[in-house]
Amino acid sequence: MRSLKRTAKLFTRVASQGWVTADGITGNLRALGVRSGTTLLVHSSLSSLGFVVGGAEAVVRALLSAIGPDGTLVLPTHTWDRSGRGDFTFDVRHTPSCVGAITEAFRTMSGVTRSLHPTHSVAAIGPGAISLTEAHELSTTPCGEGTPYTKLIQEQAQILFLGTTLDQNTIYHSLESLAQMPYLMRHDDESFTTTDWIGTTRVARFRRHQRGPDRNFAATQGVLEAHAILRKGRVAASDSLLVECAPMAGLVLELLRKNPRYLLQ
């Protein structure tokens, strides 16, 4: 019965949204403005794309094709859901991502490296992957100074919201950290047990983001468009966004410093 339901859902999706190949997605990404050789951070929703021939792995192939061999592909592989349930363990090799099927498919691919952070790790492949992911575990905040996210700003990266919105923009947390927003971090650090790529386990103290207040990141889309920092377009069946990371960071950080409640709902 479950198999029949899955099949019915598949046919419904194909009928309503059509289907797309990796090559088709690559073409859409280039038309949107993804640059060859760029460093590209991707927030993604597989279901938004319609039926993709080859599934999540095909989407990753399309992303890699769009940026070419000189580009670096970066996806979040967050695991903050675990500590929210009281599980303070993280194995960089095996702990699954909680932010979507594409991120999990990417994490497990050959040649991909992952940063050692128990709540906000990223995975990456390409010429800049090692420098972006290294030493994340030494940072005092999940997304602030010295993390992959602030490195992406420095790298003049592009950010692709593949069927998602600016509400998924993790780098806004970086800007909250850089602006020292008092609502961002918990006051106390906590013990996490982490396991690295060679199987060495250690206990270290990390500070987590605190829950709330509610954000309204998506409300910034208009100002980014007005400054020609954001482009909109269709990728497969999805409405997607492409943002230039450094100018976005500069503009929003300025607005945040003028109004500390700028990103709050």
Image (cartoon, grey):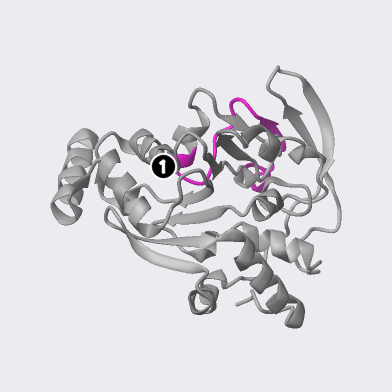
Front residue (pair 188, 157)? 157
Name the residue located 39 percent from the left edge and 38 percent from the top edge: 65
Q: Is residue 225 left or right of residue 180?
A: left
User: Can you say whether 115 is above or below 239 in the image?
Assistant: above
Q: Disc 1 marks which amino acid? A: Leu
Task: Report x, y in % for residue 19.
Answer: 20, 46
- The outermost residue toward the top is 198
Quarter of the image for the C terminus: give it: bottom right
The answer, for residue 87, to whether it is visible in the render is no
64 relative position to 261: left or right: left
Q: Residue furthest bottom?
A: 258
Does 220 appear above or below 109? below
Q: Quadrant of residue 235?
A: bottom left
**Which residues lie in the magenta part?**
82-103
Q: Position of residue 28 (x, y in %)?
A: 31, 52
Q: Is residue 5 magenta?
A: no
The residue tagged 1 is 63
Residue at image coords 61%, 25%: 93
Quadrant where the N terminus lies? top left
Say what secondary structure mark 1 lies in: helix
Residue situated in front as seen by the camera: 108 or 245 = 245
Which is nearer the eye, 265 or 31?
31
Whether the magenta-drawn stretch holds residue 86 is answered as yes
Q: State which quadrant residue 199 falls in.
A: top right
Residue nearest the viewer, comparing 262 with 148: 148
Which percent across, then down, holds residue 254? 72, 76
Name the residue located 76 percent from the left edge and 68 percent from the top edge. 183
Residue at position x 73%, y 82% in the image: 259
